[in-house]
Amino acid sequence: MTYSKLTAVSALSLAVAGFGASAQAEDLTLCWAAWDPANALVELSKEFEEQSGHTMNFEFIPWPNFADRMLNELNSGGNLCDLLIGDSQWIGGGAENGHYVKLNDFFDAEGISMDDFADATVYAYSTWPKGTPNYYALPAMGDANGWFYRKDWFEREDIRAAFQEATGRELGEPQTQKELLEIAQFFQEREIDGQTVYGAAIFTERGSEGITMGVTGALYPWGFKYENTPGSYDMEGAVNSPEAVEALEFYKEFYETATPPGYTNSYMGESLDAFKSGQVAMAMNWFAFFPGLYADPNTGGDKIDFFVNPPQNQAGSTLGGQGISVVAYSDKQDAALEYIKWFAQPDVQQKWWDLGGYSAHKAVLESPDFVDSAPFAGDFLEAMNDVQDFWQEPAYAELLLAMQKRIHDYVVADQGTAKEALDKLIEDWTETFEDEGKL
Amino acid sequence: MTQAPMTRAAEATPPTVARKIRGLSDRAIAWIFVGPTIFLLLAINIFPLIWTINLSFTNYRANRPNREVDYVGLRNYERILTDSDIWLNMQATAHFLFWTILLQVLIGFTLAYLINKKFKGNDLWTTIIVLPMMLSPAVVGNFWKFLYQPQIGLFNYIVAFFTGRDPSSFEMLGQVNLAPWSIVIVDTWMWTPFVMLICLAGLRSIPDYIYEAAEIDRASKWRQFWTITVPMVMPFLMLAVLFRGIENFKMFDLVVQLTGGGPGSTTELTSINLKREAFEKWRTGYASAYAIILFVTVFGLASIYVKALNKVKER
């Protein structure tokens, strides 16, 4: 055999071997938080398994440990996850530290356009640096912090009359943050059907992100900004603006006057429990839980209704939700990309919404049937128009923990004033950005 | 003594091992046996310690392996020692340490003293009393969280029963003035049996004839207690204090389960804060300096204490 023939045969063998490798069935592991939408994704992914021949495994971590566990996994270069539906704030670290595969070339090759997804979700879940066309995730699960309430209580004539007498106005979904507080205070320690009930369940959790996600639900409608000029890290006057101080004082008043006793360290689970047990009239939580709440046999159906986080000086909701990324340390990246390609299809996105996931695909969101497809669908669309997210910097964990501490110290532990808490927060964040070399 | 057993013993003693392993001296063989232990000690204890000291002078972050690492001199130490929040954590730790040790020693010794008396069901009571320390701290933290629940918690109802207060009028885990005591109560409930067992060992090691001699000398029970019981149990008690002191300085799981360091930072002990700095904020250099400061503190205090303990033993 001549040298050239030998080379050709070798190349062909390698090509066949390569094709064989790409076509072989893989065991893929998708990591996400353990919550209702994750179960919907398991159901949805069965179709991918049938079509591709790959097997999907899932690693779902409870929310309080999700960030710790997954960030440790990424930081240690672990290949537990081939696909990761990581929190929106991780995108900066994921991109800059090389944890996520950059998806631009893949999107171009497969004809996946980010214009097909809701702008807010692309900005929040996919891009780094923010707003630039550098994509590290496909928007997977749109989400925002919203509210739900006991519609059956709100409709009772005796309660409506009592509210009218107490406040001089009709009881209904609140149109402002202050109305929200007023309604919550009205229900606080009220006797309903022989049981003492309370105003509302809000987020006060200290350990992970709870109180920050809750308080930003008040800060954003008051007009809170992280920086005076985006990208400048100039926080003085923005983070501790008079509006921010007022919003923080409002949240503390809410905590002190309108929440159940012992509600000092509560997040998603506690909010759901408080509502389902008939303890509270209203509760804040992520839209992701709304399908499950609506389906609840005791407090769902015609007993529940939903509303978007009320505005105050402006509309504003805290962003939740995540994008799906391919982990750079995975040795099954081709199969993982296949999953993303499959997931990005409009019909799959429609099934995702039907099963209880929150699609960010415009084909789903802009469909004429969407608003009426669920009692919370319209609220979801409205919320997603005015969402704001926490810092998405690589040092986000440090920034978040500082805010957790300062806000909890003020709101729950009653230490210092709102202005002092925000001033200290600026000091903490300044130190972090100095360490990062950004100031 | 006859010659035969001595001779037999001498014959049974194996010849020097070195003679069997040719070319190796006794010293070399000793090194072969001791070597792996020394290697493990160096690898697991000494090297990480030196490495941590080295990291404590840098701005290294374990989550940014590609970032340039700069030596920052004593900046991390200066930041820690001038950070008022860290001093608050130290105060919270000192409060926790002082009260848990004091209560555990008092209650543990009292229980041991009572259990040491011979009565029916003595063994059963001992078993019941030591049950809490056999549980996992995570489990204990979780179920005390329920006990402290203001609306349904048994603890609040018991307090309400005795004081006439409304059970939901106070929040053990949520109020700044009560939360530090809530963790002291749980730790005392869990670890008093440990102190009791050590004290019990001390009490049972006192020979009866000493008390009999005291009785003959017509010493009162009170005098016997202070001149015999307490001094002879003291080394055991001090050992228990050392163990509990070191353990509680490192306390993490129980408090995280109960309060998560809250409300605010009221129960954020140094170990919880250190974990946040090291593995949530990923300020590895800073956290290393923090760990070294804590290590020196514990090591220094423990050394002084052990010297005192030895003096008590010598008496």
Image: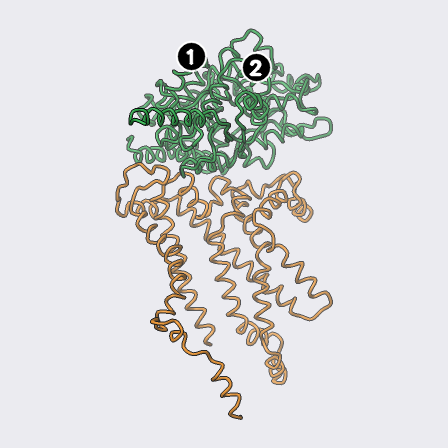
Chain colours: A green, B orange
Which quadrant of the rendered structure holds the N terminus of chain A? top left
Q: Secondary structure at mark 1?
A: helix
Sequence-earlier tag: 1 or 2:
1
Q: Residue at x 54, y 45 (%)?
A: B179
Residue B71 visible from this viewpoint: yes
| Chain that bears disc 2 | A
Q: Secondary structure at mark 2?
A: helix
Residue reaching furthest front?
A1
Residue occupied by mark 1: A115
Residue occupied by mark 2: A377
Q: Is residue A65 or residue B174 the one in the foreground?
A: A65
Q: Which amino acid is tagged 1?
A: Asp
| Disc ID at residue A184 | none
Q: Which amino acid is tagged 2?
A: Ala
Query: x, y (%) of residue B15?
Result: 43, 79
Which quadrant of the rendered structure holds the C terminus of chain A? top left
Q: Please determine whether, in this image, residue A104 is positioned above or below residue B37.
A: above
The crowd level at tag 1 (other Cα within 10 Å; few <14, some 14-19, many 20+) is few
| Chain that bears disc 1 | A
Query: x, y (%) of residue A391?
Result: 40, 27
Q: Is residue A121 or residue A281 the one in the foreground?
A: A121
